[in-house]
Image (cartoon, rainbow, N blue to C red):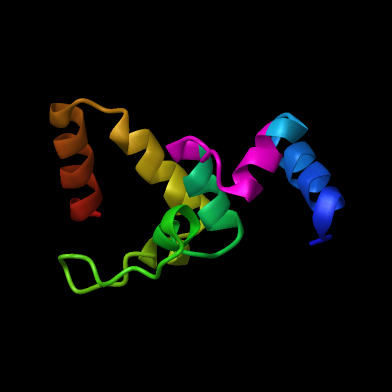
Amino acid sequence: MPGGRQRVVTVAAHFGVARETARLWFAGRALPELSRLIEMAVEYRCSLDWLAMGREPATSGVGEQASSYETLSPQERSVITAMRGLSAKRRAGLIAFLCEH
């Protein structure tokens, strides 16, 4: 990635934000919204914890690295995203269907 001013211009264009917004991100005076931070973490293959706070995550409650979502394919991530939009009943039905096959 380019440095200095060009870095700001590149990031702003890539993520579709104003150059001032990208400049504030780099200056540490503003953070992107959560969905944008997740997008950046996936794209740049870094942990969300590191991106938002500059520190590496410990392990999650289930003994896996917090950044394990990076191992998901784009198709798997879109399934999870779609599933989150379902009601609890439909989600349970989908899980039951998937476990049968």
Q: Tell whether 49 sits left or right of 97.
A: right
Can you give x and y, in whole percent of width and height, for residue 95 in the image? 20, 45
Magenta segment main secondary structure: helix
Please check the rendered image and state whether residue 22 is part of the magenta-colored stretch, yes or no: yes
* Residue for point 55% across, 64% down: 45
Can you give x and y, in whole percent of width and height, for residue 13 in the image? 79, 38
The number of numbered discs placed on residues in the rendered structure image is: 0
Please check the rendered image and state whether residue 25 is part of the magenta-colored stretch, yes or no: yes
Can you give x and y, in whole percent of width and height, for residue 81 in the image? 39, 39
Q: Tell whether 100 sits left or right of 75.
A: left
- The answer to whether residue 35 is above or below residue 46 is above
* Residue for point 31% across, 72% down: 65
Can you give x and y, in whole percent of width and height, for residue 36 in the image? 53, 40
From the image, which quarter does the C terminus lie in?
Answer: bottom left
Of residues 93 and 59, the one drawn nearer to the viewer in this rendering = 59
* Residue for point 39% across, 70% down: 56
Of residues 5 and 63, the one drawn nearer to the viewer in this rendering = 5
Residue range corresponding to the magenta coloring:
21-35
Q: Tell whether 54 sits left or right of 88.
A: right
From the image, which quarter does the N terminus lie in?
Answer: bottom right
Of residues 65 and 71, the one drawn nearer to the viewer in this rendering = 65
Q: Quadrant of residue 19?
A: top right
The residue furthest top is 87
